[in-house]
Amino acid sequence: EESKECDREKLSIEINNLSKLEKKIIELDNLNNKVIKLKQNIENSKLQIINNKKETETLKKSKDEKELQLKDIATLETKKVELESNIKVKTKTLDEIRELFKVIRSFQNTYIEHNDKAKEYKVFENEYKKVKETYEKMDDLYKKEQAGILASQLQENKPCPVCGSTNHPNKAIIKESSKIPTKEELKVAKDNLDNLEKENLEKINNLTVLNSNKRSYLEQVNNQLSLLSSTLNIDKNFNSETAQVVKNLGTDLKGIIDNLKIELSKVIEKIALKENIEKEVSVIIITINEKEQSLIKLEEDEKAYTKEFTENSTKIEEYKKEIPENISDIKTLNILIQDKTRELNDSKERLAKLRLENENLSKKLEGENSTSKEINKSIQELKIEITNNQSEFNKAIKEQGFDNIKDYEDAKLQISIIENLEKEVENYNSELKLTKAKHEDIINKTKDILFMDMTTIDEEIKSIQNNKKELEDKLRNLHSIINYNQDILKNVKELNEEFKEIEEEYKVVGELAALANGKTAPYVSFERYILASYFDDIIEAANIRLEKMTGDRFSLIRKTSKSKGAGQKGLELEIYDNYTDSSRDVSSLSGGESFKASLSLALGLSDIVQSNAGGVSLDTMFVDEGFGTLDPQSLDNAIDSLLELQRGGRLVGIISHVEELKERIDAKLEVTATSKGSKVEFNIL
């Protein structure tokens, strides 16, 4: 133990050094905590800087957008004046178009009335000529037969009222085959002819006035067309399409004006937003400045945190170099100091005990030396005694039954074996005691050590391995899909190259086919395009009667504007309302209005078919129901239109239950329901 003094000195130095580490470990813990907080502060600062920059960028974009709005508003004042001027000019043009359209309608109505009156006059003229011819024949016959009548009244020897002769040798004879009109009959015929001549003169005057009005209206139309032709880009001379062209121009211009008014209202709304936008820009600029100042502060804080973090990290590394790796905290250091102190104290205690034992042994040695002489003396005495006892021993062996000393030694050897076994047991017990002491010491040293459950870790490892396997399987599947898709893409590209030339060849044909079949915009097939040209003529002819029946309120127009969907277009109808100056779908018409429109279309179709079909004549028309939906005024207008057709030589049949029609129609076929069945009867007034 004296030789271990150097080790004890080392332990003392080591304990002293470990004690000095306590302060550094505490500082290291503080530095670690500080570094963690600094790292969090750095991350927070970076995040705040990123958010600040994003918010600033968003604000700048908003500011730029609003400044652009302000620039736009600055130009909107000029645009407002331009729009107002444009609306004023176009409104004036629209008024001129409406005035032109009004004159065109007057011309068309006068034209139709003149034609209708001319047809009526032609019928009347034929009747007038027949009456005149009949009267002239009656008058001629009456004059020619006056001699016979006078001769039949002559008496012999009485003077003739004409010549005064009393002799009548050759009297005139009345032809028996001729019916001679009487003077009264001739007077009635003359009166009838005079009335017809008066009516004829009146009709001629009316036709002259209508023709004059027609020419006057046509002259007005042509004059206005001359003035507006360059502005509206239309023909200077009136033709069959002029009315529809002018009407379409008016409708289109009305739509343009409406759009301009909407645009003007939007411009005015935007101009009204100027003050609010300027306030918003001021607020945004202030906010941007605040954000930029905040950004500078955040960047300075981030730099300070980073600098402090670097300095503390350097100190930590320096402390780690001074502190052993096996010492991670104060607790570990204290345990190590306690172990080293315990080891040093145990060594010192053992040294003290050994020194005490050495003193005791020295004292005992001195006592033993004094007795050594006595022992040597006793040894001599014992040798003599041994010799004496040897003989007694041999004698005793023989007396105990041993043949010789060897048998006695063998017996003695058995005793030695037993003693050795007892010593082994004693040694085992000693080792067992030491082992138990070590076991208790190990338990004490490891009581603060935490045991980990490896089962959970094994399960996590197994789960991770399973996930890895699934991901690898998915990756292989994705590679397979990608390869498959790449093959498909390659095939598609090859097919595209093959079809490219074919597509170029049939592209024009396909587009023409799609256009002709109405499958592409404007979704008007070739058939509908041709029909539309006839349809416009039918609509124009129908409007002449519809406007008359509705008091110039409604007129039909073919819908040319785009509508929803990709269905066939080109033959849709809209109704134009002159009262509201707007167009709407024909489905919005009431029952009576629909009847008027249908009747007008039927009459217009009849007129166009007759005018375009050469020898085709549509002299008969039947109207089935519909009159019950009309108000009295509309009913009168509809009946007047049908009566005009009748006066023009057409046969018009009306199927209806309306009682008022019975009073207006001369020839009626009445069907009456009775208990025995229906009864049919003709009534002609």
Image (cartoon, rainbow, N blue to C red):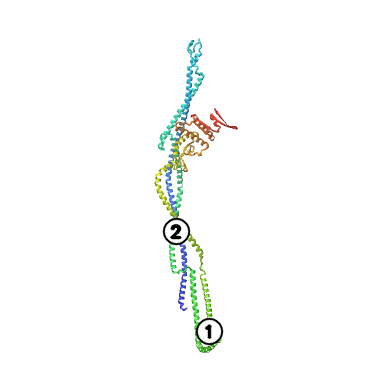
| Rendered view: 174 above or below 576 | above
Q: Residue at x 47, y 17 (%)?
A: 144
Indicate the position of residue 142 as horizontal and vertical percent values. Answer: 49, 18
Image x and y of residue 215, in percent: 43, 30
Numbered tag placed on residue 407 in the rendering: 1
Residue 341 visible to an observer of this rendering? yes
Of the image marks 1 and 2, the number of the one nearer the N terminus: 2
Which residue is rendered at x = 52% and y = 85% of the image?
Answer: 405
Residue nearest the viewer, comparing 3 with 386: 386
Q: Secondary structure at mark 2?
A: helix
Identified at 43% across, 54% down, the residue is: 483
Q: Give the distance between the C-alpha atoms of the residues marked 1 and 2, in whole angstroms.
A: 101 Å
Question: Which residue is most to the right?
Answer: 675
- Helix, strand or loop at disc 1? helix
Name the kind of residue labelled 2 in the image: Lys
Q: Where 647 sits versus 375, above or below?
A: above
Residue 69 on image: x %, y %: 43, 48
Camera-nearest residue between 3 and 577? 3
Amino acid type at mark 1: Asp
Badge nearest the viewer, 1 or 2: 1
Look at the picture and state if 168 lies above or below 533. Answer: above
Q: Which mark is residue 350?
A: none
Q: Are marks 1 and 2 in contact (CB under 8 Å)?
A: no
Number of callouts: 2
Whether residue 197 is visible here, answered yes or no, is no
Q: Residues within 10 Å of mark 2 (few under 14, many from 20)?
A: some
Quarter of the figure that contains the C terminus: top right
On residue 46, the disc is: 2
Q: Residue 538 placed where, x, y %?
A: 46, 35
